[in-house]
Image: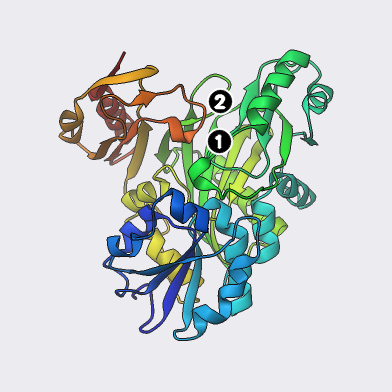
Amino acid sequence: MTASATGAQVVFVGYNAAYLRAIDGSVPSGSVVVIEEPDIIRKRELQDAAARFDCLDRIVPASYQQSAGALDLAAELTATRPVAAVVPGLEYAVPATAALAEKLGLPGATESAALALRDKVRLREVSGAGGVRNPRWREVHGPADIVDFAGDGPVVVKPANRQASVGVQLLDSVDTVTAARAWERTSSAAEYEQVPDRQLAWRFLAEERLHGPEYSVEALVRDGEIIFENVTAKTVIPGPYPVELGHLLPAPLDDGTQAAFGTAMRALVAATGFGTGILHAEWILTGAGPTLVECAGRCPGDYLIDLVDLAYGTRIRLTLIDLLAGRPVTLPRSASRSSAIRFLAAEPGTVAEVAGVDTARGLSGVEAAEVDVEAGQEVRPWASSWDRAGHVIATGPDADTAHHRVLDADAAIRITTD
């Protein structure tokens, strides 16, 4: 089934070029409308974005980040064509997407679930009340709160309502100096192109620092029931900023651990009251079982949807549109192969040379090798997902093969800096 019924339109809240590129040619011409913040349209130079994709009809300026402005568009959007589905394009668009879907009488996350997913303080409250295992945590308002919560033990300090690991810090120990530095870095984290210029409200958390392997679960949900589920094994860099270095899926797990993640996800869906859509939940596997780190109510980044599609033979972005339009969907129960991604790193400095990309692309099982920096560009130490220099993706008949292939592709690329 096509992703958009004839004559209907799909509304995205938040401009996501990767999503539009993936569905372009598979949905009717001009069937997509994007709602985006006026400031972001200006900063990202999206005024002519409709010319970049056949599926995109127009971009409508409206406030949606910590704002109900997008709801005022409901009458305008439906005046000439029915709306088939409302899709969250970006992390900050999740609450507005759910609210607009409810106003239009369409399937969605539900507004209450979306608000919990966008605020880790609220998520901790509702998930903990629903029996989901959480770390010890506390909302903090300054360095003194961090010291009071942590004592002299290890702690995580992070924003409660930002994205992409921005502002997240792992502290091995805490005193008044380290707490002040952590608060300054966390509270001053900036995302110039991702947020409007108006004043937004940010909240912050201190949490018990957990130890154990990290995983994420990608799930499609219909009317509160999980209809597709994948577990991904994660690798993060060492040090104070837990930026993700790679992913492997499906994660090679024993039956008991696989079942434990399924149970935890069902509890999370029930606790938040999530209705219909996609979830990307991050977990740490402790001795007590899966413990919740955070959960998003939109398609995950880090090319995870591409990895799922490669491993399962799916087209999750199109399926999500059908799901949010209330149409039936068919999904596989298991993967046919494994897929993996590795993000490229370079020594901080000015890029002098990039080499080995064609070699990497020619290796067995390599699906993609992309470098996002070029000669003369500055490379910074990793403090968030935005600082990575590129990526390689590989597949294989099993997890070990996919993992080794992606590491070989990573090793083939050399980014030299001065």
Which quarter of the figure is the C terminus placed in?
Answer: top left
Quadrant containing the N terminus is bottom left
Q: Secondary structure at mark 2?
A: loop
Bin the neighbour count of mark 1 within 10 Å (Cα to Cα): few under 14, some 14-19, many 20 and up.
some
Residue 384, image x, y percentages: 51, 32
**Along the line of sight, which residue is nearer the eye, 54 or 281?**
54
Return the x and y of residue 57 as percentages of the image width and height: 36, 71
What is the three-letter code of the residue carrying label 1?
Ser
Instruction: Say whether residue 185 is left or right of residue 357.
Output: right
Q: Is residue 58 above or below residue 255?
A: below
Which tag, 2 or 1, sits closer to the chain's start?
Answer: 1
**Quarter of the view holding residue 53:** bottom left
Q: Secondary structure at mark 1?
A: loop
Is the residue under label 1 in contact with that under label 2 (CB below 8 Å)? Answer: yes
How packed mark 2 is, by other alpha carbons closer than 10 Å (few <14, some 14-19, many 20 or more), is many
Task: Please give the name of the residue rendered at 75% of the width and 18% of the height, measured from the top-left corner.
Answer: 153
* Residue holding disc 2: 241
Q: Which residue is mark 1?
A: 165
